[in-house]
Amino acid sequence: MPGALGSLPMAAPPVDPALCVRCKGGRNLCGKPCYLMQDIQAHIPQVRLDRPEVQGPSPPGVFVGRHGYPKVNLGPLVPPLSLEARDLARMADSTAWYGHSINELVAQRSTLVLGRRDFSVHAARDPGRILQSTQEIALSDRAVDTELRLARVPARALGPTLGDTVPPMGPALEATRARLGENPHVPRAVDRLVGDTDAKAATALTELATTSVTVDHMQRLLSLGLLGTAERRKLVPTRWSITAVDDTLGKALLPKVKDLPELGTIHYHRASYNGNHFQVLLLPRPWGFDMQETWHAGSMWAPTTQTAVDFEEYSGRTGYASNITGAYYAGRLAVLEHLVGIGRQATVIVVREITDEYWAPLGVWLIRETMRHAMQNRPLVFDDLAAAVRHVTRFSRVQGWKENSHFLGGVYQATLGEFATAT
C-alpha cells in the first residue's frame, strides 16, 4: 500500500481540476466515473470471500446508499473474521480513529462487508427482516453478533468502498438474509427518543447531544429512519445523515454562542493529521465562520493546486456549503463546541491545507476530530490582527490565503482597532 497518493502514477486530468475538488468523487459533477477514485482503489488490498455466510460481530455498523433515491440500498456491516473487542469498538467510534494512519484505518475498515438490499426510503416505518435487523444494529452502542447470507460468492477479490464523506468500508454485496445472534444493547436515552414519535428529528438529536451518545450513533439512528415524528420517518443515505447531524448539532449551539460575550483577544489554534493541516483564528468579533481548503498538487483530488471557500456571517447561511460540502459542517461543529466551552463568541477563520500524504478518503469525521484536537490545544494569543496574519502565513503554503478569506480579504469591514494595525 503506498504511503501517499503523490507516489501513484496519475493520468492527465480529463476534467476541470476545480470540479474535482468540489465533487471529491462523490457528487458525479462531471458525469463520468471518477478516475481519481479508480487510481486509489487500484492500489488498496482487496477482500476475498470463499463462502456465502458472513458471520461476526457488527461493530455496530450500518450503511444506507444514495444511488437510485428514493429507492436505496442498505444493510449491516459485518467483518468475516474474529476481532478483539477493542478493535470492534474502534471501528464504530470515529473519536477513536484519530491518530491512526491511513493505512491502518483503510485496512481495518475494509474488512467490513456490507450485506445490502434495496428498499424504498419509506420502508423505515414498516421494515422487513433485513431492514429490521439493520435498525436493531443501529440502535446499539456495542458490537452485535450478526449473520449475513449473501446471494452469491464473488468470483474474485473485491476492493473496499471509499467516499469523501463516509468512512471506508469493505465490498457491498447483495444479501438474502440478516439475522442477529443476540439482543442489541440500547442506551436508555436512545430507547426513549426512538420511541417518541411526536419529537422532531432535530429535537431528538439535540437531546441526544446532552447525553453520552456519540455523533456516530446519532448518524446511524437518523440514517435508518429511527428519529422524527411518526409520519416523517424515512431512510436517509449515510452520506446525507452525517452532514445533517453535524449541521443540526451546530445550529443548536449557534443561539448559545451568539448570546456570549465576544472574545477579548485573537486566539490561534493549530493541528495536523494524515496530511491535513488546520490553522484556526478566532477574532474578537460577532459570530461568523469562514473556511477555506486548499488541495495541493498531488493530493487526493487535485492534479493541480485548488482552493475552495465557504462562509457564513452572523445571520447564517441560506444554502448548502457546496464548495467545501460536508467538511464545512464538521469543522463548524467542532468550533462551536469550543466556543460554548470557553463561554465566548468569535469570528472564526479556518485554513485547511491538504498534501499528498492524504492519499485515500477517510470521511469528514477526520475534519471534525482534527478540529476538535486543534481547539483543545492551548491557543497562541495575539493582540493585533497583523501579527496573527503573519503567523498563519508562516505556516501556510498558500500565498493568497488571506485574500481567499471572506473576513480578511477586503470584503468584510475591519474594526477600527484592526484597521489601525492591519497590513
Image (cartoon, helix red, strand yellow):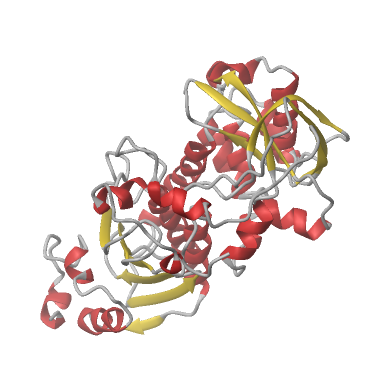
Name the residue: 71% across, 45% down.
48
Q: Quadrant of residue 381?
A: bottom left
Coordinates of residue 75 in the picture (x, y in percent): 67, 31
Depth order, front residue of 346/60: 60
Name the residue: 60% across, 21% down.
118
Coordinates of residue 134 in the picture (x, y in percent): 71, 30
The answer, for residue 312, to whether it is visible in the render is no
Name the residue: 14% across, 68% down.
414
Coordinates of residue 304 in the picture (x, y in percent): 27, 62
Coordinates of residue 18 in the picture (x, y in percent): 25, 52
Name the residue: 50% across, 66% down.
370
Q: Is residue 394 left or right of residue 251?
A: left
Q: Quadrant of the C terminus?
A: bottom left
Q: Is residue 129 left or right of residue 9?
A: right
Q: Is residue 49 above or below residue 118?
A: below
Q: Is residue 230 left or right of residue 396?
A: right
Depth order, front residue of 4/340: 4
